[in-house]
Image (cartoon, rainbow, N blue to C red):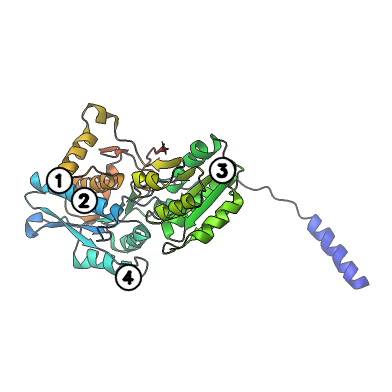
Amino acid sequence: MKAFAAVFIFLYCFTTAIPILKTQESYKQMLDDPRAFNGRVGAVIDPSSLDSISIGLFAPFNQDDPAAHDLYRGVKLAIGQANAAGGYLGVDFSLVRRWAADPWAAGSKEVVRLVYGDRVWAIIGFRDGAGHIALQIAAKTYIPVIAPLSSDSSLTHTGVPWIFRLPPDDRVQARLLVKDGIVNKQLNRVGLVSGTDQNSRSAAGEMERELNRQNIPPVFHFEVSPGLRDFQTVVERIRVFRPHVLTLCLQAPVIPKLLKALQCKGIVCPVSMPWTPGVDIKKLQAIYHGPIFIVSPFQPPIQVKTGGIYQQFSRDFETRFGVLPTCSAAYGYDAAQMIIHSIRSKGLSRPGIRQGLEELTGYQGVSGSIIWDNGGGNLACPVIKEFR
């Protein structure tokens, strides 16, 4: 016992003698420095030796997926217009589309086929992990990738110079939602429901961090599988907590099912959500009678009021497809236009096209001015739209 006491006193005296070091501030923050590529640009291919100039689209073929279908139509419109204007030095552009039902499992194989089998010059990716799969392949194969629908904050924080993201990231959207959709409205009991897919988890993580930063941590955070059919258990759990506002970070097909179940049980509170490609707000209003606050990733350029580029794009899109374009279509159109512009300015070289995309910061697209941060993410300015 005496020996134990002696050891304790020795350790106490020793540890108290150690000076307490002050925490040092970070000498550098993420994205302080621009990305750099020091690889070889390589030869520029003569387009006359090709049947067409292929651009890859890694997205579902399912026409029942509105986000994928609108993305595809936006890309097709841009390629069609480019070919009508002579393509590139007289050679037409073509679109090669591939997908895997589970992008995390078989997706890498399909992207490799785009790169080596189809020999595309750039890839336009989808969401739900597709951007990360394309990023992994791009880092090894030196092929530029644009992510027009993914808002995952981590996508462009890796410093890989081959990927560019068009929508505002989850961090920006979370700050906007919390400030304008929750704090300013004094909605202090926040409920959070998120999906188990990559994009939903990323969005929910940023929402939770921002809520904690504002000292209003969520009173609950429930995760639901995208394949869940019966929402009664989730709804009953939500009822118990009586949230002032319900924040949803879910895939588009899941949201109306949950809102319908809430409405049927008489649970009607404000709902907020980040931009979710494929969501039809009119359908949500038809089944849910509470106020809905949803992030719009961009506002059409101001020129729309005087016949600007968005209005022209909207007319062209409606003429070809018979419907008005969504944000997904606009981002698909901008992604394809930027790749085509880079090919025309730099020639057929993947590193050259990547450089061309990087130099397009400030590009005036139909989704507004596209300005890259040091990670290749678009510094877009989203807005909240309220529907009642």
Residue 244 numbered tag: 3
Point out the image quarter for the N terminus.
Answer: bottom right
Label 4 environment density (alpha carbons within 10 Å; few <14, some 14–19, many ≥20): few
Residue 106 numbered tag: 4
Q: Along the polypeptide, which appears first: circle 3 or circle 2? A: 2
The residue wearing badge 2 is 73
Determine the secondary structure under disc 1. helix
Label 2 environment density (alpha carbons within 10 Å; few <14, some 14–19, many ≥20): many
Disc 4 from disc 2: Cα separation:
25 Å
The part of the image, by quadrant, that contains residue 285 is top left
The amino acid at mark 1 is: Arg
The amino acid at mark 4 is: Ala
Determine the secondary structure under disc 3. loop
Q: Along the polypeptide, which appears first: circle 4 or circle 2? A: 2
The residue wearing badge 1 is 320
Q: Is residue 70 above or below residue 315?
A: below
Q: Nearer the viewer, residue 72 or 357?
A: 72
The amino acid at mark 2 is: Arg
Q: Nearer the viewer, residue 205 or 245?
A: 245
